[in-house]
Image (cartoon, helix red, strand yellow):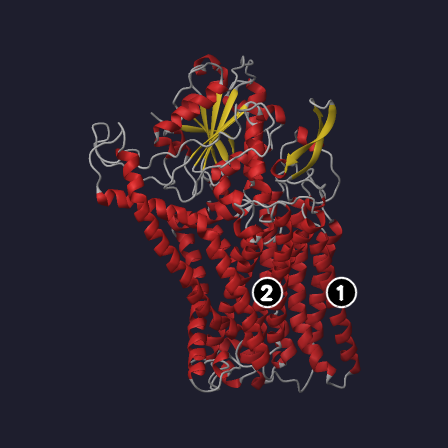
């Protein structure tokens, strides 16, 4: 029997709202029926029922002994079409956005919390500048300055001939070549603005339903300005019955009215990042012309250059002020837009870019493009700024963690800084890979900066140093990888007797142990446990990246040469040359891999689904740090689920179980947090294969920490969680009461986890299972007999209510 049709044992209207996990699922599979009908929603996200259940509200008597199954399908929010495969190029932006949400749980640290958010936003801003600077390096330096200024390079490429310095045409002057090439990075910034604005209109502009929570107390301050509570802010006052006095009620962070409505912040950050990109292009163009004019005799051009550079510095200061000034507004639905920042800042940057192009295009006879543009200094400043910001972020995170320690928090509170460092590394690999590959293409058989035979000087020296440390980083990563492999092998061997005892001790034992079968089960369990040690790999990679990045900057700054020419002769020179060549190949291979995956995903539905799974996990959180990151699908999904539960329970007075698998359990929990208090008491929660504690609770302690999960369990009518030891994603909730838990939900709010489900259900063949049962791991929880039992028990716990008379003639009216 389909899990959606298993009946509860008591009467009263009941609804089971199913939410699928990562990768998506069809409503036919979720409901166990090929005939389904859309009740409400659109092609991106919708609620479905079986065709026979479409008019369920009009026939409540027919559903006294079974629930009304509904399926909420949201997969098209993240993986609906091939164009979204191009979001792979936004991976560094998505990763740094995750770092914002990984801050430790704040406890009386308002200033430190605000500092943490501001530092993450500044790291995100540096990634936008890095991407734009890399585009300027390719278009302005390598193509317009170096190749077009070299007779040998431009002669081999006819499409650059009109800019060749040897032809002495109108475009042959360096300033005019730079002005023309600036169209490329400016177009890239415009594309990022367009994509962010388009997704902003589709996601962040979807205002959540108006409810009682919208009237919560609060001013226009951001989340980081909230009162000094641990995980929430005051949104009302309640009666302390024992003491006879009123006390503040603390609303969890995910329950705040404006949490899933980030329209204002994304608009403000989009304006600032767009302005930063345009100012970077303007500085690259105007800076080259101003440096030439400072050594010339034209006083007017010299004054114009000074004024223009001063205006660019002022524009950069304005961008920094807008980014660092304030974060998210969550205490209420914030529908206002900072028009001064959103409209004037990008407009002013665009005006400065136009003036820079006009200034650089002014005729300067005798100006030649020798050597390279000062890209080395630019990239060194960016890398040093990123390193300093990450270190400061680590200090802030550590200070927050010390105030509210929890042993399950990853890396002792340093998960956010570690992930921010990985985002910087990804940005460096992607941007450096583009510059390295274009330089090798333009240089022909030579190696720029290495053998002296290249026809162009090549990219900045720092990029070669960064490429050279990649083989060293991989060698460092190899050590913990081997140790974990050995540890997993020994863990699997230790699990063998335990597994045999589970299946063959007592009356449930069947047959004899099979060594191959037992080792397969043990190996699956041991590999699933690797999820719990993943923070170790992240910490090692982030720490090594920070140290090796600093070494690369120091080597480039002190030597001024590529690694292969910085160590003289001998073994050190050979090792440096090998590292440089191998690193250059690896960094180019990494970029080509990203492009190939994007092209394949555009054409191949299965590859597109795989990439969609990545976005399902990475884009759950709103865009709080980087506006060019892929959009947050939860800003549509969570209000959808909340509104559906509120309207159904309010209209029918019936019972409701929201059932979430994997990432669907995270959406379900977030939606329950948004419910009014009286509605939460009429809702039960069933999760299976859930990463709520194992991943979200450890990596995002301020939002899914132990206290938040305990409060959630106390506020719903009941919560049950199913898990397997073979599941690499889901796990137990591990909820423990620090004090006597409040609320009148389950008899014991800490009794959430059921005993681990056996996987496989049976060990060998039997009369009931004539074929070997598969090891399911993270999938098909509904196939286990305990699933239907737990759901039926949850439905029976909810107090049956007399159904109200249905209004309307179809199930669609309930939406």
Query: Which quadrant is home to the C terminus?
Result: top right
> Does residue 402 appear in the picture of this structure?
yes
Mark carried by residue 289: none
> Looking at the image, which residue is at 51% across and 71% down?
466
Q: Which residue is mark 2?
A: 130
Question: Compared with residue 426, is residue 783 higher up or lower down, i.e. above or below?
Answer: above
Label 1 crowd (10 A; few <14 / some 14-19 / many >=20): few
Residue 760 at x, y = what percent? 30, 37
> Looking at the image, which residue is at 62% across and 49% down?
402
Secondary element at image label 1:
helix
Residue 91 at x, y = what percent? 51, 56
Query: Which quadrant is home to the N terminus?
Result: top left
Q: Is residue 801 left or right of residue 756?
A: right
Label 2 crowd (10 A; few <14 / some 14-19 / many >=20): many
Q: Quadrant of residue 782?
A: top left
Q: Quadrant of residue 6?
A: top left
């Amino acid at each position: 029997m389909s899990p959606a049709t298993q009946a509860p044992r008591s009467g009263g209207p009941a609804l089971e709202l199913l939410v699928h996990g990562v990768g998506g699922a069809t409503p036919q599979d979720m409901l166990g029926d090929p005939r389904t009908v859309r009740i409400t929603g659109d092609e991106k996200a919708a609620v479905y029922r079986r065709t026979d259940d479409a008019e369920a509200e009009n026939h409540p008597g027919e559903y006294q002994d079974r629930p009304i199954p509904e399926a909420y399908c949201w997969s098209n929010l993240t993986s609906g079409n091939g164009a979204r495969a191009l979001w792979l190029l936004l991976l560094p932006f998505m990763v740094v956005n995750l770092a914002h949400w990984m801050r430790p749980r704040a406890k009386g640290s308002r200033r430190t919390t605000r500092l943490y958010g501001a530092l993450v936003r500044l790291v995100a801003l540096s990634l936008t500048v890095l991407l734009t600077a890399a585009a300027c390096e390719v278009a302005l330096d390598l193509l317009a300055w170096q190749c077009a200024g070299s007779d040998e390079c431009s002669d081999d490429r006819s499409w650059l001939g009109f800019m060749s310095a040897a032809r002495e045409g109108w475009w042959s002057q360096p300033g005019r070549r730079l002005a023309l090439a600036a169209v490329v990075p400016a177009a890239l910034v415009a594309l990022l603005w367009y994509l962010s604005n388009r997704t902003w209109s589709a996601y962040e502009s979807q205002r959540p339903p108006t409810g009682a929570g919208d009237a919560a107390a609060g001013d226009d301050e951001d989340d980081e300005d909230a009162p000094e509570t641990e995980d929430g802010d005051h949104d009302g006052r309640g009666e302390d019955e024992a003491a006879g006095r009123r006390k503040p009620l603390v609303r969890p962070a995910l329950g705040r009215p404006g949490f899933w409505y980030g329209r204002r912040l994304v608009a403000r950050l989009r304006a600032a990042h767009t302005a930063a990109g345009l100012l970077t292009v303007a500085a690259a163009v105007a800076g080259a012309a101003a440096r030439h004019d400072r050594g010339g005799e034209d006083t007017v051009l010299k004054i114009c250059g000074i004024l223009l550079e001063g205006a660019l510095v002022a524009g950069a200061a304005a961008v920094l002020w807008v980014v660092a000034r304030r974060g998210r507004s969550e205490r209420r639905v914030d529908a206002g837009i900072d028009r001064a920042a959103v409209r004037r800042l990008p407009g002013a940057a665009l005006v400065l870019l136009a003036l820079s192009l006009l200034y650089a295009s002014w005729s300067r006879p005798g100006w030649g493009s020798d050597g390279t543009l000062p890209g080395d200094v630019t990239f060194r400043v960016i890398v040093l700024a990123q390193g300093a910001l990450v270190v400061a972020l680590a200090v802030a995170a550590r200070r927050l963690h010390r105030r509210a320690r929890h042993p399950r928090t990853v890396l002792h509170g340093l998960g956010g800084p570690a992930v921010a460092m990985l985002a910087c590394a990804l940005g460096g690999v992607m941007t450096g890979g583009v510059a390295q590959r274009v330089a090798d293409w333009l240089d022909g058989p030579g190696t720029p900066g290495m053998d002296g035979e290249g026809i162009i000087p090549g990219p900045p020296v720092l990029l070669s140093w960064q490429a050279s440390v990649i083989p060293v980083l991989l060698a460092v990563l190899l050590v913990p990888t081997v140790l974990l492999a050995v540890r997993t092998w020994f863990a699997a061997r230790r699990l063998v007797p335990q597994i045999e005892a589970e299946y063959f001790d007592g009356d449930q034992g069947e047959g004899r142990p099979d060594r191959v079968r037992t080792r397969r089960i043990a190996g699956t369990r041991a590999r699933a446990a690797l999820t719990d040690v993943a923070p170790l790999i992240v910490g090692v990679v982030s720490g090594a990246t920070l140290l090796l990045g600093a070494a690369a900057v120091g080597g480039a700054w002190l030597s001024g040469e590529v690694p292969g020419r910085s160590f003289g002769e001998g073994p050190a020179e050979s090792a440096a040359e090998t590292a440089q060549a191998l690193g250059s190949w690896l960094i180019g291979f990494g970029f080509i891999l990203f492009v190939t995956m994007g092209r394949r995903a555009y054409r191949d539905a299965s590859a597109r689904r795989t990439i969609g799974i990545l976005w399902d996990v990475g884009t759950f959180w709103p865009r709080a740090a980087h506006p060019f990151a892929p959009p947050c699908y939860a800003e549509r999904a969570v209000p959808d689920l909340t509104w559906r539960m509120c309207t159904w329970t309010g209209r029918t007075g019936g019972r409701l179980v929201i059932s979430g698998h994997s990432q669907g359990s995270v959406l379900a929990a977030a939606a329950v947090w948004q419910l009014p208090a009286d509605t939460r008491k009429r809702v039960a929660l069933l999760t299976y294969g859930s990463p709520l504690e194992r991943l979200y609770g450890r990596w995002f302690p301020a939002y899914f920490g132990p206290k938040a999960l305990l409060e959630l369990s106390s506020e719903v009518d009941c919560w049950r969680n199913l898990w397997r030891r073979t599941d690499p994603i889901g796990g137990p909730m591990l909820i423990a009461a620090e004090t006597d838990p409040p609320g009148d939900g389950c008899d014991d709010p800490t009794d959430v986890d059921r005993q681990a489900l056996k996987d496989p259900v049976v060990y060998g063949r039997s009369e009931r299972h004539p074929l070997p049962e598969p090891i399911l791991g993270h999938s098909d929880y509904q196939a286990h007999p305990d699933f239907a039992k737990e759901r039926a028990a949850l439905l029976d716990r909810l107090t049956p209510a007399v159904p109200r008379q249905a209004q309307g003639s179809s199930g669609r009216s309930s939406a």
